[in-house]
Image (tube, grey):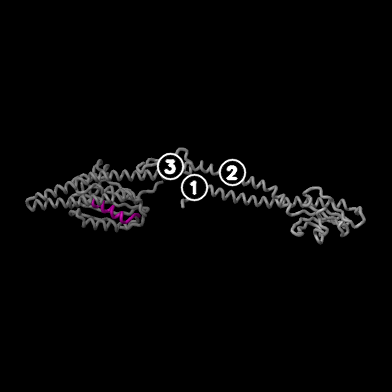
Amino acid sequence: MRPASLQARLLAGLAVVALGVGGLMALLATRWGGHELDELLDAHLAQAAALLVVQHSNPLAHDDDRVLDAPSLHRYAPRAVFQVFHEGSLALRSSQAPIAPLVPDMASGFHTVKRGDVSWRVFVTRGASQDVTVLVGERAAARQEILSAVLGPLLALGLAALLLMLLLGAGVLRWGLAPLRTLSQQLAARRPDQLAALALPGAPTELAPVLGALNALFARIEALLQGERRLTADAAHELRTPVAAIRAQAQVALGAHDDAERRHALSATLAGCDRAARLIEQLLMLARLEAASAPPRTPLALAELARQALADAVESPLNQGHALALDAPAPVAAEGDPLLTQVLLRNLLDNALRYSPPGSPVTLTVEAGAAGDWQLRVEDGGPGLDEAGLARLGQRFQRGADSHAPGSGLGWSIVKRIATLQGWSVRAGRSSSLGGLSVRLTPEKPAG
């Protein structure tokens, strides 16, 4: 089943509310109107009885036992009857009244009695001399007929007004929801590569957050797509070099006439394969990081992670007698993702080993600061970078001063992306103690 539209849901809700409120008002109006009508007609009965009492306060004109019947002067006359008893005997009655008293005990006041299939509302009163008793009655059904005659047209008008209100409400809802239809039409008409910001002139304020969220989503998708396009173009260009080198060394190995030349060509082929594999690994890592959202932050044993990363660097093929050192005197309260932090530290140490001379020092320092702050530094004894090199740092496939060093220039991009995901800031400069490059990571300060 198709889900109901927002307009249909709102209209149904309005209809239920209107019917509920209208039904409650009709019920209250019926009860209130019936009560008021009963009071009015009871007053008429009392007035009629009073007139009859006044008229028969003196002895009746006839002395025999005949009962006088009042003439019926109107077609509505059967709805109301009266009886006048003098000293317990019926002396006067309307033509439709029975011989027996409407109220058997003739107690004074209002009574609701039933004679046969007809219910009567009867008022009983006595004269000043107590020898005259007057009973004035009215059919109960007549009251209901009057109430229906009065409220029926009003209820019909109310129902017609309700239907008109629902029709007008449907039109108002359609007019009010027109911006939503326009928005859906714009989205349906868009091509997959059309990621420009949505423009909806005259949009109500309630749609502003939706438009803002959609435009922000389009901007993020556009940024991701542009990053993927740049990465794909740069990777295609960068992969040509190791692939061409592997092909060339393979051709040399095929045409070699002695074992030494063949062995040298095969060694160069293996080195080219390693470089291509490293490049592909970094490209895949960077692609995952570009599409990733910020991971949940958990407490990190940063000093322990730094110790493990340094132990891995000792066994790395890039370690050519470097003097690796760790300075982490105390535990540090940091937050982040352990796996991403390991990747970040490995890339920082790999870069330090790649671009520093064999045997030069490489230090990893973890320090705790005041108020929960901390910093992590990786320093090397290499040539470092000048101002232009520092400005280019982080651009993909841009290597350090030693452009012949093995690498793809993606390590720094990976470091910056991981730091951004974990809410860390990265700064690079010259090491004051070792003379090479110094990379410092610290937690970002909250805005404001």
Q: Earlier in the sequence, mark 3 or mark 2?
A: 2
Q: Nearer the viewer, mark 1 or mark 2?
A: 2
**Which residue in the protein does label 3 denote?**
185
Q: Which mark is residue 164?
A: 2
> Residue at the left extreme?
257
- What's the distance in space between the residues labelled 3 and 2, CA to CA? 30 Å
Q: Amino acid at mark 1?
A: Leu
Q: Nearer the viewer, mark 3 or mark 2?
A: 2
Amino acid, disc 2: Leu
Q: Residue at x 27, y 53 (%)?
A: 345
Under circle 1, the secondary element is: helix
The question of residue 345 being in magenta is answered with yes
Q: Kindly identify which residue carries mark 1.
A: 6
Q: In screen coordinates, is 409 left or right of 447? A: left
Direction from residue 77 to residue 437 in the image, left or right: left
Q: Magenta region's main secondary structure?
A: helix
Q: Is residue 353 left or right of residue 336?
A: left
Q: Residue at x 18, y 53 (%)?
A: 320
Q: Of 156 and 341, which appears nearest the observer? A: 156
- For badge 3, the amino acid type reads Gln
Q: Residue at x 51, y 47 (%)?
A: 8
Cα distance, mark 1 to mark 2?
21 Å
Residue 277 at x, y percent in the picture = 22, 52
Q: Which residues are magenta?
A: 335-351
Counting every numbered tag in the picture gives 3
Above/below status of 200 relative to 369: above
Among the 4 quarters of the image, the one containing residue 136: bottom right
Residue found at the far right of this picture: 63
**Is residue 284 rendered magenta in the image?**
no
Residue 424 visible in image: no
